[in-house]
């Protein structure tokens, strides 16, 4: 079991302190003075972002699935050919200097589409000011991945006219975060902390299974493990895995299955979960269940992401690894930028 001294020693930049603040940051962001932007006559939303900023797009893609607006995620350099005057292109770069997202921003400016940008400043802000693109500055807290919660709730406020989430849903999700915080924050380094327990369970590469509606959670968890613990992780759609990935378990493996389940998964998906668990049990393969809370889609997503981000942070400390540095990412950026 890790201690508070371990946190201070191996997380000297205080990432855990930012996570401890997430419920407060969420509430402050949503109740901020950001103006609500009115967006009319759109049937297509493109969300562009990479890394921690791209995870924000993953979450909003899941939320938009609850209405009739088509969403395209862009994690790269190219916009879809379907962008037209009924498309809203949203570019997100916490740093404001992400080369791929800046390329999308510049490309979109020359198209007949609606355009909006979010960052903490940088080249994105400079470009928007020069060309009159709608820009919203949102504070960066420690790192893009730690800033996730501020960006999510700020964008929920700014784009509330088109996001299929009510104010009651938003406030419910914040209440859920507050309740979860009491159990998993860094002041509770005991066996009652479910995130800490899961971090100790992951001894090898985790194989993260998820249902369709919670893909954003699985991708975020994988990325957080990779960045914070500097180790590998893989993700599997539970339904698709029954057609291919399950075959790999015929060979002895050190992978650790982690099953992220939604309380209201589709009934056929629940049958896949039951079958997969039966298969694991019969073959003596240990797995770990992570279940969503009851509530609206935002509450489910944010609660799971909060709990699993803490898992990655605690795992890093358990491995005596500073979660903050991203030397390999910096190497790639230096080569490309």
Image (tube, rainbow, N blue to C red):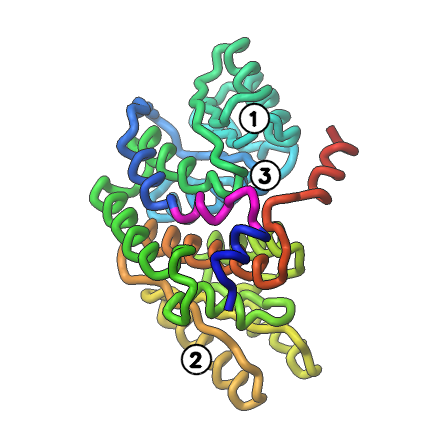
User: With 138 as the anchor, is 254 left or right in this view?
Assistant: right
Q: Which residue is mark 2?
A: 274
**For residue 184, which quarter of the picture?**
bottom left
**What is the x, y in percent for residue 91?**
51, 29
How packed is label 3: few (under 14 Cα within 10 Å), some, or many (20 or more)? many
How packed is label 2: few (under 14 Cα within 10 Å), some, or many (20 or more)? few
**What is the x, y in percent for residue 56?**
47, 41
Q: Secondary structure at mark 1?
A: loop
Question: Compared to 171, does 242 lie above or below?
Answer: below
Of marks 3 and 1, the one in the foreground: 1
Instruction: Find the residue positioned furthest to the bottom.
Output: 282
**Tag 2 or tag 1, which sits nearer the N-term?**
1
**What is the x, y in percent for residue 90?**
48, 30
Residue 297 visible within the image? yes
Q: Residue at x 38, y 61 (%)?
A: 188
140 vs 129, nearest the viewer? 140
Q: Which residue is mark 3?
A: 50
Q: Which residue is mark 1?
A: 96
Q: Secondary structure at mark 3?
A: loop
Look at the magenta stretch and give its main secondary structure. helix
| CA distance for labels 3 and 1 | 11 Å
Instruction: Find the residue positioned furthest to the left.
Output: 168
**Tag 1 or tag 3, which sits nearer the N-term?**
3
Question: Compared to 329, does 214 lie above or below?
Answer: below
Residue 213 visible within the image? no
- Specify the segment rendered in magenta: 11-20
172 vs 13, nearest the viewer? 13
Q: Secondary structure at mark 2?
A: helix
Q: Tell whether label 3 touches label 2 (CB within 8 Å).
A: no
Instruction: Find the residue positioned furthest to the right.
Output: 335
| CA distance for labels 1 and 2 | 44 Å
Of marks 2 and 3, the one in the foreground: 3
């Amino acid at each position: 079991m890790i201690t508070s001294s371990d946190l201070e020693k191996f997380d000297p930049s205080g990432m855990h302190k930012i996570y401890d603040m997430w419920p407060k940051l969420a509430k402050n962001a949503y109740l901020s003075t950001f103006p609500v932007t009115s967006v009319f006559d759109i049937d297509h939303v493109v969300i562009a972002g990479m890394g921690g900023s791209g995870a924000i797009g993953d979450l909003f893609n899941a939320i938009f699935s609850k209405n009739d607006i088509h969403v395209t995620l862009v994690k790269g350099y190219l916009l879809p050919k379907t962008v037209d005057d009924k498309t809203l292109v949203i570019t997100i770069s916490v740093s404001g200097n992400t080369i791929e997202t800046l390329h999308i921003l510049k490309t979109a400016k020359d198209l007949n589409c609606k355009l909006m940008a979010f960052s903490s400043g940088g080249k994105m802000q400079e470009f928007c000011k020069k060309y009159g693109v709608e820009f919203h500055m949102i504070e960066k807290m420690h790192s893009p991945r730690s800033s996730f919660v501020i960006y999510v709730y700020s964008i929920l406020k700014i784009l509330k006219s088109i996001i299929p989430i009510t104010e009651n849903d938003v406030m419910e999700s914040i209440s859920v975060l507050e309740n979860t915080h009491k159990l998993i924050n860094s002041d509770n380094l005991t066996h009652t902390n479910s995130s800490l327990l899961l971090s100790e369970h992951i001894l090898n590469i985790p194989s993260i299974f998820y249902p369709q509606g919670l893909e954003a959670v699985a991708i975020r968890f994988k990325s957080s493990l990779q960045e914070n613990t500097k180790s590998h992780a893989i993700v599997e759609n539970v339904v698709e895995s029954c057609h291919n990935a399950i075959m790999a378990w015929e060979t002895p493996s050190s992978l650790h299955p982690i099953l992220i389940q939604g309380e209201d998964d589709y009934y056929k998906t629940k049958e896949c979960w039951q079958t997969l668990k039966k298969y694991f049990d019969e073959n003596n393969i240990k797995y770990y269940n992570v279940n969503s809370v009851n509530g609206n889609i935002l509450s489910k997503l944010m609660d799971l992401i909060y709990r699993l981000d803490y898992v990655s942070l605690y795992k890093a400390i358990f491995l005596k690894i500073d979660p903050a540095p991203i030397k390999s990412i910096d190497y790639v950026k230096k080569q490309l930028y």
